[in-house]
């Protein structure tokens, strides 16, 4: 009996330590990105809607932009869609979509049905660009400043609260507006 009891007690203690550690960990919902404070990776992909055009980061040079990685297969992408439409309607920053490992026809139909929050949409069919951006999974959003530096990242659903609390202060600080 003792030979089974000690490993079980040890396992139970390990579980308790892990639970306590997770509950007291600061910023446990935020996955830090190594891109923060560094130049944005190259963005050069075919346009989802017009295959004769390309979507590039250089087209955004000198202005803020929000890169949003999404896919029709992503349940959480649908959950954040209304927030992206609201951000677009504010008119403070263009949203560039990166449709990740998706079917073009399904993505176009999805945008037609739900509305299009994007100024431009790149098709990352093989996922190579998302790898360069350090994407863990969709949805993810990156705020890039006019100097081309990534200043904020959201892994998971973008909400109005996250937009106001974590993203807008970066833009306001550069404009000299008090938060």
Image: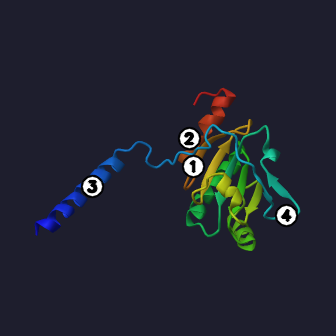
Residue 111 falls in image quadrant? bottom right
Which residue is identified by label 2?
166
Which of the two discs, 4 and 3, labels the residue nearer the N terminus?
3
Residue sitting at x 15%, y 65%: 5
Relative image position of residue 88 (x, y in whole percent): 70, 50
Residue sitting at x 83%, y 57%: 54
Does the CB distance between marks 1 and 2 fall below 8 Å? yes
Task: Kindly report the distance in space between the C-alpha atoms of the residues bearing marks 1 and 3.
Answer: 31 Å
Which residue is identified by label 4?
50
Q: Mark 3: which secondary structure?
A: helix
Q: Nearer the viewer, mark 1 or mark 2?
A: 1
**Could you tell me if residue 117 is visible in this image?**
no
Relative image position of residue 104 (x, y in whole percent): 75, 70
Q: Quadrant of the C terminus?
A: top right
Relative image position of residue 19 (x, y in whole percent): 31, 53
Q: Nearer the viewer, mark 4 or mark 3?
A: 3
Does the CB distance between marks 4 and 1 fall below 8 Å? no
Residue nearest the viewer, comparing 175 with 43: 43
Residue nearest the viewer, comparing 112 with 50: 50
Which of the two discs, 4 and 2, labels the residue nearer the N terminus?
4
Task: Kindly report the distance in space between the C-alpha atoms of the residues bearing marks 4 and 3.
Answer: 54 Å
Does the CB distance between marks 4 and 3 fall below 8 Å? no
Which residue is identified by label 3?
14
């Amino acid at each position: 009996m003792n030979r089974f009891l000690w490993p079980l007690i040890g396992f139970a203690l390990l579980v308790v330590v892990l639970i306590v550690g997770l509950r007291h960990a600061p910023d446990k919902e935020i996955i830090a990105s190594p891109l923060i404070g560094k130049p944005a990776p190259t963005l050069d992909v075919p346009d989802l809607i017009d295959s004769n055009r390309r979507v590039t980061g250089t087209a955004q040079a000198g202005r803020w932009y929000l890169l949003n990685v999404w896919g029709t297969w992503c349940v959480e992408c649908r959950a954040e869609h209304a927030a992206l439409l609201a951000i677009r309607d504010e008119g403070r920053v263009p949203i560039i979509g990166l449709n990740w490992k998706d079917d073009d026809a399904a993505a176009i139909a999805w945008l037609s049905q739900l509305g299009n929050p994007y100024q431009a949409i790149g098709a990352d069919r093989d996922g190579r660009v998302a790898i360069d951006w350090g994407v863990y999974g969709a949805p993810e959003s990156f705020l890039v400043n006019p100097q081309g530096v990534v200043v904020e990242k959201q892994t998971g659903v973008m909400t109005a609260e996250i937009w106001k609390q974590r993203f807008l202060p970066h833009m306001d600080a550069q404009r000299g507006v008090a938060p």
